[in-house]
Image (spheres, helix red, strand yellow):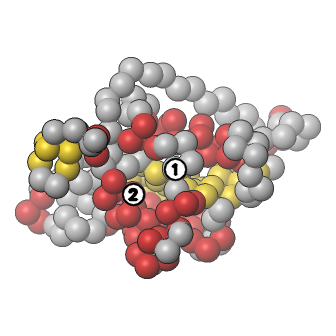
Amino acid sequence: MRGEVIAEPLREGDISPVTDGACAVVLERAENARDKKGVRIAGVGLGTETYYPFWRDLSVLNAAVQASRVAFERTGWSVDDVDYFEVVERTPYHEAMLAEAIGMKVRDYLDGGMKKFNLSGGALAADPEPATGLVRIVEAAGILTGKYNLDAERVLTVSGSGLGYQTCIAFALEKE
């Protein structure tokens, strides 16, 4: 059961549960970390758009498009070069919208691409605002360092804030 209808078609179980939580990431200069296995930030992208909802198309997450594009430009990667994705999705449709914003074709997402998204369960499992985006980075690092026993070299995280994801940031992470 997904619970009571909150706003058609969304039910209680379709909306991320706001939870308590904390998260921390330790960053180290590359020259200090040479003898350690870890994760490297290969690129970062930021995207923003107007907060006034009537001045934009709410069916497209343009800030996520911008953030992903910049992260890909800084790394030289494309969506096809990424092994897994950790995204902040507060409803099931947000994940599909973010997949499209990142550059994945909707058909590819539906035909199995969704298996590459949110191995952690994403924000739909727990949404410790405002740490949710940082949690995605920690989970991406876990993917790259063996938490899920996967052979992964690259993960992209995308998180957003504001009603309709008006501000988004993408982190391209790779195994050292």
Amino acid type assigned to the residue bearing label 1 in the image = Asn
Q: Answer with left or right where residue 117 lies relative to residue 16.
A: right
Residue 131, quarter of the rendered image: top left
Judging from the image, what secondary structure is the residue with disc 1 in? loop
Query: How many residues crowd around disc 2 within 10 Å: few (fewer than 14), some, or many (20 or more)?
Result: many
| Residue 146 location (% of width, % of height) | 76, 42
Which residue bears the numbered disc 1? 118
- Distance of label 1 from label 2 (alpha carbons): 9 Å
Judging from the image, what secondary structure is the residue with disc 2 in? helix
Q: Answer with left or right where residue 77 lies relative to residue 101.
A: right
Residue 123, quarter of the rendered image: top left
| Residue 30 location (% of width, % of height) | 79, 42
Amino acid type assigned to the residue bearing label 2 in the image = Glu
Q: Is residue 14 above or below residue 63?
A: above
Q: Residue at x 41, y 75 (%)?
A: 106
Q: Is residue 126 above or below residue 112?
A: above
Looking at the image, which residue sits at the far right? 35
| Residue 119 location (% of width, % of height) | 56, 48
Residue 81, quarter of the rendered image: bottom right
Q: Is residue 65 above or below residue 167?
A: below
Q: Residue at x 60, y 37 (%)?
A: 138
| Residue 132 location (% of width, % of height) | 43, 36
The reply to whether the C-beta atoms of the residues labelled 1 and 2 are less than 8 Å apart is yes
Looking at the image, which residue sits at the far front? 1
Q: Residue at x 8, y 63 (%)?
A: 54
Which comes before the other along the chain, label 1 or label 2?
2
Viewer-nearest residue: 86 or 161: 86
Q: Residue at x 43, y 56 (%)?
A: 46
Q: How many marks?
A: 2
Label disc, if present, on residue 95 of the rendered structure: 2
